[in-house]
Image: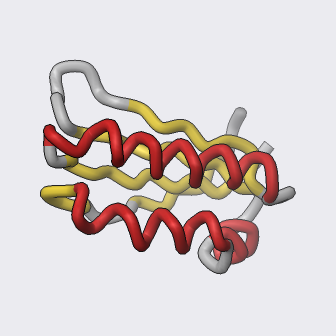
Amino acid sequence: MEAFVVIAEFRVRPERLADFLEAARDDAAHSVADEPGCRQFDVVEPEGEDGTVVFYEVYNSREAFDAHLQTPHLDRFRTAFPSLILEERPVRFLQRRYP
């Protein structure tokens, strides 16, 4: 089944990692629970890359992701994260063609 995939990556201040993960969990949990078009929202840390956090988000469509951009939980995350990170890497958008 096709899907719209979003990959966002952050380098987080080491002393603020717990705060960042708390804000990320709130956004991820509400995305999956409250947005019918959000299929999956994983918050992951790549092995060997301390302080890096990646969001792997799967939506039914680009429109479902655009709806995500208007949610209160994303607003909370957007307010919280700037003071918690060292760098936000460019967001990647992908089309999944095969499950």
In the image, farthest residue toward the right: 36
Residue 61's spot in the image, x, y percent? 73, 64
Residue at x-position 43% and y-position 70%:
78
- Whether residue 41 sits left or right of residue 6 in the image: it is right
Tell how many labels: 0
- Whether residue 99 sits left or right of residue 76 in the image: it is right
- In the image, residue 85 sits, relative to residue 66, either above or below, namely above
Residue at x-position 38% and y-position 64%:
80
Residue at x-position 65% and y-position 72%:
72
Quarter of the figure that contains the C terminus: top right
Q: Quadrant of residue 19?
A: top left
Quarter of the figure that contains the N terminus: top right
Residue 88's spot in the image, x, y percent? 24, 61
Residue at x-position 70% and y-position 52%:
30
- In the image, residue 71 sits, relative to residue 8, either above or below, namely below
- In the image, residue 58 sits, relative to residue 36, either above or below, namely above
Q: In which quarter of the image is residue 44?
A: top left
Residue 54's spot in the image, x, y percent? 37, 42
- Whether residue 5 sits left or right of residue 29 in the image: it is left
